Amino acid sequence: MSIEVAGVNKKFGDFVALENVNVTIPTGQLTALLGPSGGGKSTLLRIIAGLETADSGTISINGNDATRLPAQKRNVGFVFQHYAVFKHMTVAKNVAFGLEIRKRPKAEVAARVDELLKLVHLGQFAHRLPSQLSGGQRQRMALARALAVEPQVLLLDEPFGALDAKVRKELRDWLRRLHDEVHVTTVFVTHDQEEALEVADEIVVINEGRVEQVGSPDQLYDEPANNFVMGFLGEVTTLNGRLVRPHDVEVATSPRPEALTGTVSRVLRIGFEVRATVTTEAGDVTTVMTRTHARSLGLESGVQVWLSEAAGATTVPVEPTTTVG
Amino acid sequence: MTSIELGRPAKIRRSARSTLTPVSGLGLGIAMLWFSLLVLIPLTAVMVTAVDGGWDTFWAAVTNAQTAAAIRLTVFTAVGVTLVNIVMGPIIAWVLVRDRFPGKAVLEILIDIPFALPTIVAGLVLLSLYGSDSPIGIDIVNQRPAVFVAFLFVTLPFIVRMVQPVLEELDRDVEEAAASLGASRFTTFRRVILPSLTPAIAAGAALSFARGVSEYGSLVLLSGNLPNKTEVTSVRILSSIENDQRASAAAVAAVLLVISLVVIVVLDIIQRRVARRG
């Protein structure tokens, strides 16, 4: 049940939200749409759901053209950042909503609601009102409600964006496990690269309305297509005209061939990690290493060091037009 | 230990019954005094006057054919107008909140005119439009529709203005969630939007009914105040007082008071039912 997005364009007034977007989202997988805020990823998700219409281009779900289909007929489950609960209905009624609309027999609805509430660990909250639940619980209820209608695809728009860091991490792990159980084709939008790298099978990086790269988390991290992807997926620093990750910069205290020399200007310790800024002729270079390693090198301000790329490091040549770095 | 544990539930129960501190107690006192002076004492005085002359006088006043006709006309018209408002009010509010069109700002202001206009001016306006030399050819002077139209005019803003802020507060993503679950526009309105609006509609309806029952200024010119035909209770009360029949006036007032109370309570019950059912 793959989703095919072909040649989609969308403008809001003068603002180009999506520009000639072509993506295939594979069946049964958990795909992340990753990118900075305002980059068009939510718009793409809403177009797939039918909540927004593309100016041009087509959407097909499971081989059927859905471009002109209203949201009601697409059979997609949608989960919103701010939960979008039906405030006046109990948790059980919220989950039952889609089934009741489809006029399923009462006994079947009750059984399915029961099963879903257990799946999202809300079994004992069936008769509560949403206002009596925490944010994380509300979002799990919203997920159960979306899953109730057995959607062809499940779409989540920044599902954990409104939650605090701890709950967010819990729900993220839980979503991964849930997906392994339910196996419905799932697409979620996030601007948090860690979330995408940790949860997704496949990541679509979207920036300024365009798809920058599509691939597995490893592919994106190890073989970024350009400066933007390299910069968005993790920290970068510039060494010898190439973008490189700070932990891939090797620091030596004696001269080495082809190494760039400089002076340590700042050392900052964050827990087990030490970040050292080295001032060279070509500008500042940031390096990251473990506390133990820094101690063995005797790294402190004013020390002269020689910097080189670690063997097998991921690097990308600096493109003059980008501002990433 | 045991005594402490036993003591605790009692404390909780007490705090559930009342949350008054000395300061909030003073606040309550002032509120009650204000409320008593303005509302409770005058209302009691009316009730006392109504039954002053004994039950027979009261009953005679209320069952007097002309008075009974006036009460019937007033209550039925107020109910009818309120029903119309229950349908029209949310529609107007919806248009004002959800649609964008030229002249919207003007319409926003026009809605409040029935609030702002002195009622006798409203009466003049209605008379010039629906009077004997009506420019649109509708003459309802001295007929019952005159009362209906006057009530409609003055009660128009109530439900609109109650529903509008609630509608503005409604999250659009809730409607989108309903749509993605397969609900048609109508189902979404009936099962998701309407339950959220019901308390506001009920409150507006109660105000609209109360205003209708009490209306005087806007209809006296147009309705002609014909006994047994277009005479409403407020006019009837005034004529009773002019004829020095204080007890009779108070009796009618008492009946209206009871009817208004009943309507407000019934609307509140309906509102709770609908809001809970979803």
Image (cartoon, coloured by chain):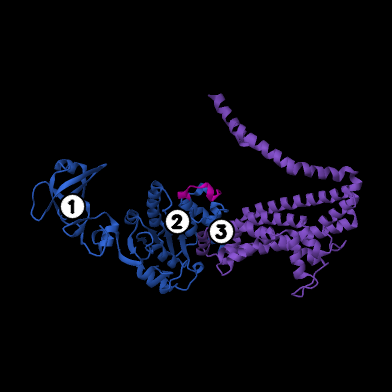
Chain colours: A blue, B purple
The residue depicted at 38 percent of the width and 70 percent of the height is A4
Q: For the point 74% across and 62% down, which residue is it?
A: B121
Residue placed under numbered mark 3 in the picture: B168
The quadrant in which residue B123 appears is bottom right
* Residue stretch rendered in magenta on the structure: A126-137
Local SS, label 1: strand
Q: CA distance from mark 2 to mark 1?
A: 38 Å
Q: Residue at x 81, y 55 (%)?
A: B234
- Give the labeled residue for mark 2: A81
Q: Nearer the viewer, residue A138 or B80?
A: B80
Q: Is residue A128 magenta?
A: yes
Q: How far, Cα to Cα, is label 2 from label 3?
A: 20 Å
**Helix, strand or loop status at disc 2:** loop
Quadrant of residue B117 within the rendered picture: bottom right
For residue A105, what is the image quadrant?
Answer: bottom right
- What kind of element bears circle 3? helix
Q: Which residue is mark 1?
A: A249
Q: Nearer the viewer, mark 1 or mark 3?
A: 3
Query: Which chain is home to disc 1?
Result: A
- Name which residue type carries label 1: Val
